[in-house]
Image: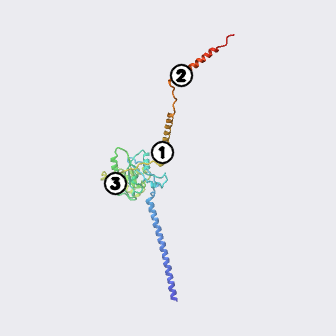
Amino acid sequence: MSWLFICRNSTLLCLKASAGNRTLLGVAMSQQQQQQQQQKKKKKKKTTGIPDGWLDYCPVGSRIPGTRFIPFKVPLKAALNCQLPASQSFDLWDLLDSVRQQNQELGLIIDLTFTTRYYSVSDIPQCCAYIKIPTEGHRVPNDGAILSFKRAVRHFLSQNQDNSRLIGVHCTHGLNRTGYLICRYLIDVDRLDAAAALQLFNSSRGHHIERKNYIRDLQHAAKRSNRGIDEPERNPIMGLAVRKEPATLIKHQEKVESNTVAQHVKASGDESAENQQPKEKQPSQKQTKRRARRRYKTRDKKSADGSAQGHDPAS
């Protein structure tokens, strides 16, 4: 009996331990699934939402003095702008409006972002050329990206010597990669010193370059070679998008046009009605003569009656 009792207790202990292990395993699996779901949500938000920190920077800087450069943050497509208040949205048409408010005209957009999710080539206005140089963030751009940037700028300048159109440059925030490559061009090609180039960019952008590794490279690293910068690398893409009027404005214009047409039709109808009214019939020549004879007879009769009555004789 004692042996059976011991075996029974051992079995119960084993069962309890097994159940406990299953519970712990279930909890661990549940936690792992939750972590995976959270990671998926973060990844989805990262690839579909507004860029982190995007709202912290002004949309467009000003033209960098003595150059054709103007820096700005990445414009967003309609699917992203609809997540923002109208006062904070920023698309490619807003970009053009901002540049025109500075009495400038944009001719080329150089896109440095390492993704295509912010806007598509079909969104680019037809008045602008576009070239993409994918540049990874946080790291100093490699020599290949630097050379591509220099070539794009030199090609545009050679093709636009008869005008003053600007070269717009953007990364995500229009600050670090944008600032580095513009300053690198000013240092390597235009022969500015690093301090002057940084001061020009920071002042025009309205924000200072933040990444220390970018600043250190500009200040202390050797200049990059300009060999081959006048050789064509790729032709920019010309934009095709045409600005669409807002729906409310279109409805207003249609209403105004409809009212104008209605007024015109009414005026034409009134004029036609007046023209269709019967005109007074002119008397014939015989009728005119008869009326004249009647007037003469009436006048002669009145004259004869007056002569017969005369005046009272003098007493």
Side of 46 relative to 235 (left or right)? right
Residue 41 horizontal/vertical position (percent): 46, 63
| Mark sitting earlier along the chain (1/2) | 1
Q: Is residue 306 left or right of residue 99?
A: right
Kindly report the distance in space between the C-alpha atoms of the residues bearing marks 3 and 1: 48 Å
Q: Earlier in the sequence, mark 3 or mark 1?
A: 3
Q: Position of residue 290 (x, y in %)?
A: 53, 22
Label 3 CA crowd tier, 10 Å (few <14, some 14–19, many 20+): some
Instruction: Choose the circle earlier in sequence order: 3 or 2.
Output: 3
Q: Amino acid at mark 2?
A: Arg
Vertical placement of residue 213 versus 280, above or below: below
Q: Amino acid at mark 3?
A: Ser
Q: Is residue 293 visible?
A: yes
Residue 148, numbered label: 3
Task: Compare residues 112 and 150 and report the one nearer the observer.
Answer: 112
Q: Secondary structure at mark 3?
A: helix
x%, y% of residue 82?
47, 54
- Determine which residue is flagged by label 1: 254
